[in-house]
Amino acid sequence: MTDGAASCVFILVALILAIPSSSSAQEDLSYWLQRGQGSFQNGSFQEAQNCYDRVLKIDPDNASALVGKGEALAVLGRYKMAELCFDLALKSRPKDARLWLEKAMVNEKDGDYIQAGVSYDKALALDNRLAEAWLGKGNISFEMGDYNESLSCYENASRLGAEALARAGVIKTWLARGTSLLKQEMFEAALNSYDEALAINPQDQGAKMGKAAVLVAMGQRLLADGRIYDASRIFENASLLDPENQDAIQGRIEVLVANGNSLLNRSLFSEALEEYEAALSLSPTNSEALAGKEMAQAALQAEAPKVIAKLQATPKTDYNYHLDRGVEELLNGSYAKALENFNKSIEMDGGQADAWFCKGLALFHLGRLQEAAASLDRALEKNQSYAEAWALKGAVQLRMGRYRMAALCFDSALRLDPNNSTLWVSKATVQKELEDYEASLKSFEQAARLDANNTAALLGKGNLLLELGRYHEAVECFEGVLSRDDTNVTALRGIGDASFSLEDYDRALKSYEAAQNHSPRDVGSLLGKAQTLYALHENASSLQAFNSVLEISPQDVRALVGRGDALMALNDYVSAHSSYEDALSKDFGNIRALLGKGEALRLQGQTERAFQCYEMVLAKQPDNLMALLGMGDILSLQNDLAGALIAYDQALALDAKSVRGLIGKGDILLLNDSPGRALDCYKKALAIDGKSFRALLGSGMASLSLCDYSSALKSFEDALALQPNNSQAWTGKGDALFGLKDLLQARRCYERAIALDSNSSEASCGMGDVLSAGGDYGAARPYYERAIDLDPRNARAYLGEGNALCAAKEYNKSLQFFASSLSLEPNSVDALLGKGLALAALGNNSEALLCFEEIIAQDPENFAAWSNKGCLLATLGNYKDAARCLQRALQQNTSDETVWYNLGMVDYLLGNYNQSAFYYENATKLRPDDAAAWLGRGLALNRTGLFREALASFERAILLQPQNIYAWYNKGLVLVAQKRFQEAQVAFQTVLDIDPQNSVANYSLNLTRGYLNGTM
C-alpha cells in the first residue's frame, strides 16, 4: 500500500533517513559455501539454503551458491524457487549439462512436463550420454502419453547403464499403453501391450491384471452382443490371470443371472433355477439371483404337474422320444444334451415345429443366437401361428440388439395371443429401446390392464417414467407395487430415485434405507443412499456409503465417481483423483469422472493435466458448464486472462447465476485493472450466495482497488466470519485498515495473517507498509525482502523496498526495485512516482520528468504526478510551466496545503505577488500552524505594499517559530517601511541574538540606528 498524496512533497525537502543495512565482517564466501554443502549432505536442507543465502547477499551472481540453493529448495519441495535459482545459475553456466539436468528434474517434479522436456533436451544436446536425462525424458514422455518416445528414451538409458530403472520404465510404459488402448476399446492392441510387458517379466502382477481387465472388457462386449457362451469363456480366462478380479466374477454372475431372467420370462423355470443357483455359488448374497431363484422355485411348484402330464401324454414314437428327452434335459439345464436330442428328433422326422422351437430354445440358452433365430424361422415355416416361437424369436432379436425386428416378432405373437400380459411387457421393453416412449407406456399399461398383478408391468412403466423425468407419475406406479408387496426392493428404490430427482431428500433417504432393510446388498438402493447423503452435504457418511457399494460391486463406475465427489468435498484431492481414475479405467468416456479428475488435478496444481481433462469433456459436450469453468480457472492461473474471460463468459451464457463463473470473471476483471466491473460480478455472486467466501474476498479486493476502504473492510470482516483462520482475509482486512489510516489495527491484522501463514508474501508486505508509514523503514525492509523471497513476482514488495531505500537516501539502490516492480506491473503509478522522486534526488531531472509525464499519460487527473512535476520544474527555474502543473494539481485536490504553498512560492518568483499572497493565505487556512506559509504570505503582502497585513503574517510565523530568523528579519523590514524604527531595531537585534554572525541583520540594525540618531 502506498499513499500517493504523501509522496507529493516539495522536491527540495530532505527525505527521512532509514537505518542503513550493514554487512557482517565475518561473512566469507568460501566459509558459507562449504557450510552449505555440509548441511545439505547431512540432510539439513533449510540450513543449507540459509547458508547459500548468506553467500548470495555478498555475491548475488555466485553460480555455486545458486545451484546449491536450488538443490536445497528442490528437496524441500519449493520447485518454482528452485527453478529460478537454476535459471540464474545458467546465465553464467549455459553449457553445463548437469545444471540443465538439475533444472529438468525440478520441472518434472513440479509437473511442468513441457519445460522439463526442453531442459532435458538441452542437457542431452550438451552430453547425450547422460543416462539420468534419458530416464527423465522417458518419464515425462510417459506422463504426456507419448509412449513410443518413452520406450525409445528408456532403451537409450538402458544402453548407458541404467538397466534396472529403464527396465521398470519400459514395463510401466507397456502397461500404460495397454490401459490407454483399453480405454479406447482397442482390445487386441491392448492385449499386445500387456503381452509385451509379460514377455519382459512373466510374473508382473500389473501386466496380468491389465490383461485380465482387457479380457473382461471383451467379455462384457460379447455379453452385450448376446454371445453368452463366448463371454463366459473370456471371463474364466480373466479369472485365471487375476483370481481377485471382481469384474470377471461379476461378469460370470451377470451371464448366469441374464440367462436365468430370460428363461424365467419364457416360463422355463427349471433351467432358470439352475442358472440362478450357479450365480449364487459365486455370490451367495446376490440379490437378483436370490430373487430369481425364489420366483423360479415357486413357478416350478405350480408347473410341475402340467409338465409331467404333458410328457406322459406324448406318443412314444422314436422322434417324439428324442423330443421328450430333449425337453427333460432342458428342464434339467443340460442344454447341450437337449440340443443333441432335438437334432436327432429332427433327423428322424424332418422336424416338427415343436422340435425346431425346442432346438431354438436350447441354442438361445447356449448363447448361439444366430443359430437360434434360424431354428425358430424353421419352426415358423412349419407353423405360422406358433405364438411361442414368435415370442422367443423376439427375445433372440432383442438380445442381439435388433430392436425393430424384435418389435415385429412380438407384434406377430400378440396377434395370436393378444391377452398375454407378458408379451405386452416384452413389446414395451422393445419400444423403450427404440425410444418410442409413449407407445412403450401404452404397452406397459395394457399389460397391467390384462393382469392387475403383473408387477413387471408397473415396475417397467415406473422406470420409464423416471427416465422421462415424470417423477410424480413414476412414484404412483411404484406405490401401486408396494400396495401389494411392501417389501419390493425395486419399487422402494424407484421411489427413492424419483424423490431424489425431486430434491425430496428426506423421503429418498427413507426409501433407500427401507430397500436396504429388505436387501442389504442391493447396489442400487445403497448407491442412491450415498448420493442422497452427498446432496445433503453429509460427506463423510456419503463416502462410507459409496465404499459400501464398492465392497459389493468393486467395479461400479457410478460408485467410483461418487466416492471421488465425496473425497473432493472432504478436500482429499489425491484420493479423489485415484477414484476418478478407477472409474475412467472402466468407462473411458465418463463425463463426470473426467470432470472430477480435472478438478482434482487442478486443485493439486497439476494444471496441464487438468486442462486436458476439460478439453476431452468439451470435445464431447461443447456446452459443458463445469468444464468451461474449470478451463477458465486454469487459464487464469496461467495468466491467460483473455482466454479465461472467454471461458467464463461462455459459462455464464449457459448459466447466468453460476456463482463460480461470476467469481472467476470478477477475478479476471480485477487482474485486468477493471475493479468496478469486477465488483459488479462479486455483488451478483453474493446476491445468489451471500455466504460465498471467495465472492466476499473478491469484493474486498475490488473495493480496495477502488480505494473504498470502508466497504473493503466490511467484505473482509464478513469473510472472516465464515473462515476466521484465513490468512488472505486477515491480510485484506489489514490493507483496508491501512487505507483508513488505522495503522495499529492494520498491524495486528498483518501479524495475525503471518501467524496463520508464515509464507504469506502479501501479509509480509503489509507489515512492511505499516512500519514504513510509521517511519520505521529499517524494520520494514526485512518484511519486504521476505515478501520478495516468498513471491518473486510481488510487485508491491519491490515497491515498498524501493520506497524504504529512498527514505534511507539510497536512491541508486532503490531504482532497481522500482524497475522490478514496473517489470511486473508496467502501469503502476506508485512505482513510477517512486522512481521519479529517486531520479530527481539523484539530479537526473530529465528522466524524472519522463516518469511524471508517463503517469499523466495514463491518468491525466493524477494529483501527485502534476504536483511533483511542478515542483521539479520549479527547481529547474521553469516557473511558468511549474505554475501550470501546480494549477492542474490544484484542480484535482484543493485540500492539500503543500500545493497552495508551492504555488505561492512559484508566483512569488514570477513576480505575481497578489496571486502569491492568495495562495499562501489558502495554505495557512488549511494548515494554520505552518510558519513557512505565514512567512511566504508576509513576503508577498510586503511586496504589494500591504505592510500592516504583512506584519501580522510575520508575527504569526514568529508565534509559531520564535527562533525563525527570516520571520524576525522581514518583520524588521516591514516596520522600517512603516517608519517604526524602535520596533524594527528590536526585530533586527533578535535576529542577531539568535544568529550573532548574521551580517545582513547587523547591517540593517546599523541603518535603523542611523535613522533613529538622525544620521541617515
Image: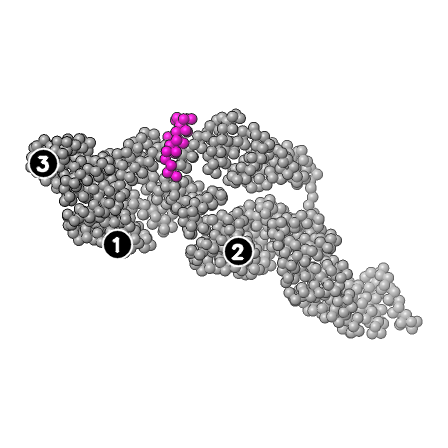
Query: x%, y% of residue 479?
Result: 23, 53
The color scheme shown is one colour
**Residue plotted at (14% across, 35% down):** 351
Amino acid type of disc 3? Answer: Leu
Q: Which residue is mark 3?
A: 311
Amino acid type of disc 2? Answer: Leu
Query: x%, y% of residue 1002?
Result: 87, 64
Q: Secondary structure at mark 1?
A: helix
Q: Which residue is mark 2?
A: 669
Mark 1 neighbour class, 10 Å CA radius: few under 14, some 14 to 19, many 20 or more = some
Residue 708 shows in the view: yes
Q: Which residue is mark 1?
A: 438
Q: Quadrant of the C terminus?
A: bottom right
Q: Earlier in the sequence, mark 2 or mark 1?
A: 1
Q: In the image shown, does 754 or 664 lie closer to the viewer?
A: 664
Label at residue 718: none
**Residue plotted at (20% across, 45% down):** 409
Is residue 190 inside the magenta stretch? yes
Q: Secondary structure at mark 2?
A: helix
Query: x%, y% of residue 329?
Result: 16, 33
Q: Secondary structure at mark 3?
A: helix
Q: Earlier in the sequence, mark 2 or mark 3?
A: 3
Foreground mark, 2 or 1, reads 1
Q: Earlier in the sequence, mark 1 or mark 3?
A: 3
Residues shaded magenta = 184-210
Tell me whether circle 2 and circle 1 mark residues in contact (CB < 8 Å): no
